[in-house]
Amino acid sequence: MSSSIGTVVKCSVFGESHGEAIGCVLDGLPAGEPIDMEEIYLQMGRRTPGFDRTSTPRKESDTPHILSGMLDGRTTGAPLAVIIKNENVRSKDYGNIMSMPRPGHADYTAHVRYDGYNDVRGGGHFSGRLTAALVFAGAVCRQILRRRGISIGGHVLEIHGVRDLELDPVNVDSKLLEDLASRRFAVIDKAAEEKMRGEIEAARKGQDSVGGIIEAAAVGLPAGIGSPMFDGIENRLAAALFGIPAIKGIEFGAGFGFAKMRGSEANDPFEFTKGGEVVTTSNNNGGILGGITSGMPVILRVVVKPTSSISLPQRTIDLVTGKNAELEVHGRHDPCIVPRALPVVESVMALTLLDILETEARIKG
Amino acid sequence: MSSSIGTVVKCSVFGESHGEAIGCVLDGLPAGEPIDMEEIYLQMGRRTPGFDRTSTPRKESDTPHILSGMLDGRTTGAPLAVIIKNENVRSKDYGNIMSMPRPGHADYTAHVRYDGYNDVRGGGHFSGRLTAALVFAGAVCRQILRRRGISIGGHVLEIHGVRDLELDPVNVDSKLLEDLASRRFAVIDKAAEEKMRGEIEAARKGQDSVGGIIEAAAVGLPAGIGSPMFDGIENRLAAALFGIPAIKGIEFGAGFGFAKMRGSEANDPFEFTKGGEVVTTSNNNGGILGGITSGMPVILRVVVKPTSSISLPQRTIDLVTGKNAELEVHGRHDPCIVPRALPVVESVMALTLLDILETEARIKG
Amino acid sequence: MSSSIGTVVKCSVFGESHGEAIGCVLDGLPAGEPIDMEEIYLQMGRRTPGFDRTSTPRKESDTPHILSGMLDGRTTGAPLAVIIKNENVRSKDYGNIMSMPRPGHADYTAHVRYDGYNDVRGGGHFSGRLTAALVFAGAVCRQILRRRGISIGGHVLEIHGVRDLELDPVNVDSKLLEDLASRRFAVIDKAAEEKMRGEIEAARKGQDSVGGIIEAAAVGLPAGIGSPMFDGIENRLAAALFGIPAIKGIEFGAGFGFAKMRGSEANDPFEFTKGGEVVTTSNNNGGILGGITSGMPVILRVVVKPTSSISLPQRTIDLVTGKNAELEVHGRHDPCIVPRALPVVESVMALTLLDILETEARIKG
Amino acid sequence: MSSSIGTVVKCSVFGESHGEAIGCVLDGLPAGEPIDMEEIYLQMGRRTPGFDRTSTPRKESDTPHILSGMLDGRTTGAPLAVIIKNENVRSKDYGNIMSMPRPGHADYTAHVRYDGYNDVRGGGHFSGRLTAALVFAGAVCRQILRRRGISIGGHVLEIHGVRDLELDPVNVDSKLLEDLASRRFAVIDKAAEEKMRGEIEAARKGQDSVGGIIEAAAVGLPAGIGSPMFDGIENRLAAALFGIPAIKGIEFGAGFGFAKMRGSEANDPFEFTKGGEVVTTSNNNGGILGGITSGMPVILRVVVKPTSSISLPQRTIDLVTGKNAELEVHGRHDPCIVPRALPVVESVMALTLLDILETEARIKG
């Protein structure tokens, strides 16, 4: 595994779905930053399943327990370690013998990669459960960023073809993002939300699942952050966001829509505001030009594949018998993880952007 | 800047569009690998403009000159440094005073990032010219990978809405990929190619440009390569590919198409072949499950935005006068860089995959 | 802080002396490695103080509690996280207001570095206590290395001028090293040990402390490991070993003794053994030539400065009053930490060498 | 190989002794820094051999040719690439068949590491010749540091037992360091210099060589720089300095002398100066406490082993015949490389300290 990331602000994630605890170590945080635990609980709550029919009934209390790196409510500059106990674990749902790898999961590839020694119970270290640690990390970083004028938030843009309104790439502001970032199933258009819930419910009833798209933004980043060619904003965000299970694509600004554009439409014209600030009148580039922030909102979209765990019978192989087989997975599945993945995406953005800012601190001065 | 990438096989890229030379240092290559210069010339030729109306008439001879790391036609294990002289440079097309930043370019963001000291002539280090060094690096890595049974190739999937046939994600093989990887404007469907050329010509005539999508694949990778959470195949390929100018999105396998799928469609069923090999009967996951190769073809798509350089008048700002302004850029522009970006994408894939393989060498046995 | 190290096998250390727990995350360990907890307890016991008069009477039970990464006694390939609870903490010995920085400690420099927010109680993250996590990590890596034929061990070479016999750089073998690595106050020459104990006791009585030198070796490393210029064996071992508090110098082979030598003495002649193996008849280079292992024992020495904590009155400053002051630190101090630092040195060597071997795995094959 | 180093300011070194050129790429330099080429030539001249009998008569013109990253005399922020042509190469002195590995050299270990494909002519990439690129890099970084109030310099402290005066660790200032850093055979005590020259001449006449110790310092570093546990000043400087061929040990401040000290002697008392500045009245810790700068001069010593190339007959093996053999190496050898290694040591210090400062820029305010 290589579950560590970061240059100055580093995050090392650990844990397995059915182990004793998961957690992470945040190394390189600036010292003296006050940390509001209530906000951390709120963010972690957004990821927690079990609140309605859109997610698995498995209850996860997700209480983070900080072991080091904080004193009197502030960061000390030393590594901040947190553990989150695994509760409500029903290991009998699974065993540690990888017999029939679940389609769409990492079961088979991990089996090969780790010579059969990986913990397969509940997906082990590949479980979406691990994202709780990322949300913790992001909830810490988000607070530090906010004090520097940076807000991050997002919404469920699409579920199984049902689409929300897009964020306004020019005018999206911290107020909207902070509001979205406090919600559990953040959709802008109420009507779309209803239809999305309908799609999820239909999938649940069909013992199936659905995928979707998350759109997220960061506002308040100064122009001039990012180090191309390989430590540009896009490189760094993409490298981190693909660490979230089920993410299979990412696009910035107009993204894949650029393929249908001409340069005259795609190029964002520069303009001085009345206050003398430099802006662009459109923001197809998603706030990033040449890998460097332009000062406009950073806009990205990631696609989340349908939950691989479904109760419908599926064709697979039996590694023990060496024969083709049919698999029925019973247990508690999310018919759609997109809403729960949303705070994870925002969190990984926060972690990555804080790392970039700390690494390039001289520039901001 | 941060124009270096890699863990074991590292690449450090240098140069500016109107400087004396560009190039790169490839550090950490395995020793004793024979390098065929003809293949390098061929690959670099695929990126070179000036061969037809789809690209800029600026001629670049692009002759790589190796300074170190090779002896008697083989790698020595020491860093392989190459320089490519800049010829046919017409610096009078530009000056080094950043007056009017070109929309869509890094001019403004680099100006802020580098306090106005960056070389703006021809885009400086941000120029697409720099990708010649990446193609060199990729052409070296590609040969090493091929001897390990791995082939990489791709095609222009879409230009301004005109779409080629997609690669067959299950059956794409080295023969097709090697063929595509030897062509200058690689499109599978001849009819689509003609229409694409029409779109490019129309853009050229309109002093405009068009964007598109590149689809590429790697076959022959063994199952079990990649180190999630953050050094998985997707993390690593995305981090590297966003180093190519104009790339604004990436997706693996079904990618953004997953948003419209159900799990029962999306999950790729496993199957034993008659020979006892493990395959999946579909390949929506693009050969990657949980960040680890499944042994199926690795399939990805990247979107290339329309060339930012267009001759049409554009609104921008004048940093010298502090006023809004109109910009007309004369000079030699590519109406479409998608075909030229294709070998660059393949090259960055080759560089990244070789690095991953060398870093995880123990796994391969 | 930047308490993480490693390329493939990574270690992220966390905790503070008077916090709830310390620990580390070992990311990138090979999967399927059986881990003997008894050996871990033994190694951690070697570092634990309180067994005799040479160390602080503070009792540390040092029981490692593994949270993840192991199943059925074997590594899973996922990050191995461990916590070690802090017990017997007497925070009233200290407060968190940095008033008078202790000479020789990081109190003042950390105060500046972390803007006064670092946990100063017991030295916080700078405490020698943190080395318990390193010994845990090393005890894991040491077992994996041993199965590959590699043994690591060392001894107290010097304390306050009293010197043990040196290891024979040509003939030191795994038997001796494993024996030394199981002992609590490992000295080869019993007479020297007695004198050393006398020096420590004299320092203790004088409310003072003494420094010394640790000599350690690794045998069984194949020739051809290491990647110069900057990832050679010496670069990597030195970078890691200076992470141990109080280490102020390192030398390999003849080390500083080379300054008094001629080339004809210093150069180690090569020779074929009767079995056709390549050896050197002397080993002034400490098993490393050009940063790469020669197959001979890797020999190094590190100097440990006298424990900074002493009870004698010392001149310092008062950061609160802004005046010069005199400091008397009462509490429990080690008059000599050299014997306790020995397993830490061996552990950091094990961690570093395993990382190098895993990173360069292809070579060994 | 792994000839790249750095976190924000990165250096990738390339070239082989008898190849066409050597050089390096400096990636991540701050933009807008004026670079004085005269100072670069001066520094490179200090390393150039052939000026007197203390070094090899091989002439190296060592003219650096900058390819990118500078414009109008200032850094652009893009990677700065330099090549230094190899001239006066007499390849017939060597062949590329590794028959008899030279004792003390990397010949044998590189042969194993690179499967016999490394360039053995003149030592290939292991040649001291490569340090010319490091001196170039250091000469660039040194200028940037000086504008931030930081000076680096050093002297030959010992050659074959003959010892110069030590630097005053408390009072050494930029004036002395800058003076030493402009000299070719920098020794403080003229009488010691004469004796050293005598030792070198005696070694030369005896077809032998001698080793020695370099002492160097950096002044002007603010307190509070460095990130323990593993990116402290000592970790980083040691990791880089062991990249210089022939360096076999490093110590900071009192270094190995600590082994004979008591804590009451070793601890450096803090004191407020009349101006309210915090200083220590002694500086046994070499300006570094807990891996972080204290604001006092950073002092280090490195040992340089005797030049491995000597003309005396030596015992070795013949890899072709598989038999023990005797080797006589004729050619042009340095009887002592210590004076030439001095500017290299200073340069690597400059490169490393600039990288640390840029990485931790936020701290400096």
Image: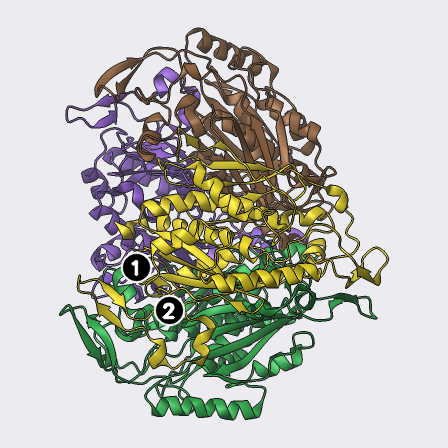
Chain colours: A brown, B purple, C yellow, D green
Q: Residue furthest left?
A: D321
Q: CA distance from mark 2 to mark 1?
A: 15 Å
The residue type indicated by label 1 comes to: Gly
Badge 1: chain ID: C
Chain ID, mark 2: C
Residue B189, can we see it? yes
Where residue B270 appears, x then y in whole percent? Answer: 27, 22
Tell me residue C208's x, y (percent). Answer: 69, 61
Q: Residues within 10 Å of mark 1 (few under 14, many from 20)?
A: many
- Quadrant for the N terminus of chain A, please: top left
Q: Amino acid at mark 2?
A: Asn
Residue B113 x/y as whole percent: 59, 54
Q: Element at badge 1?
A: loop
Q: Nearer the viewer, residue A300 or C187?
A: C187
Decide if residue C52 is on the left or right side of residue D267.
left
Q: Which residue is mark 1?
A: C224
| Vertical placement of residue B224 versus C58, above or below | above
In the rendered image, residue A106, in percent from the top left (x then y), is placed at 37, 27
